[in-house]
Image (tube, grey):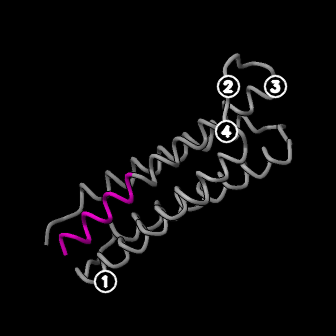
Amino acid sequence: MPWIKILHIATLLCWCAALLYLPALLLASARARGGEATFDVPAPALLRFLFTHVATPFALLAIMSGTLLFLVGRLTGGWLVLKLMAVSGMVLCHVLCGALIVRLEREQFRFLAPASGLLAATSAALMLSVLVLVLSKPFD
């Protein structure tokens, strides 16, 4: 079971990093398209690549290893339900990030910058709630 925990923590860290990094890149791209940035920003194709080939596989591995953890360890409790709700929120943020990437590719810049900032803040809040729930889990 320790190797499952290691896999889960490693993939969760990578997924969380992607959930914070992609909205930041979206925000930079939206500002650059509006003429506010003076530096090079990544092309939408790079954002799509990072989303589909980096963030999504890590998200799937984190969810699968987490599911395996509570099945093998026979974990139950109210904290687990709350944690799964927070993880579901992170999945929703992941999906919304993909939708914003599609909007960027279609050059629909309206509300892209505020939505990216809100997405990053919501993702961070959900990650923090998962961390608090896991660390406050009662010992069996």
User: Residue drawn at (31%, 59%), measured in percent from left and top?
Assistant: 9
Which numbered mark, 2 or 3, is in the foreground of this view?
2
Magenta part mainly helix, strand or loop? helix
Disc 4 on helix, strand or loop? helix
Question: For mark 4, does the 10 Å Cα neighbourhood hold few (<14), some (14 to 19), or many (20 or more) residues?
Answer: many
Which numbered mark, 4 or 1, is in the foreground of this view?
4
Q: Amino acid at mark 4?
A: Leu
| Residue under numbered circle 1 | 71
Residue span colored magenta: 1-13
- Is 31 left or right of 53, judged from the image as shown? right
Between disc 4 and disc 3, whose residue precedes? 4
Of residues 116 and 17, which is closer to you in this image?
17
Q: Are marks 2 and 4 in contact (CB under 8 Å)?
A: no
Could you tell me how far apart the alpha carbons at marks 2 and 4 are, in whole angstroms? 13 Å
Q: Is residue 9 magenta?
A: yes
Could you tell me how far apart the alpha carbons at marks 3 and 1 are, in whole angstroms? 48 Å
Picture coordinates of residue 32 (x, y %)?
75, 26
Which numbered mark, 2 or 1, is in the foreground of this view?
2
Residue 40's disc number: 2
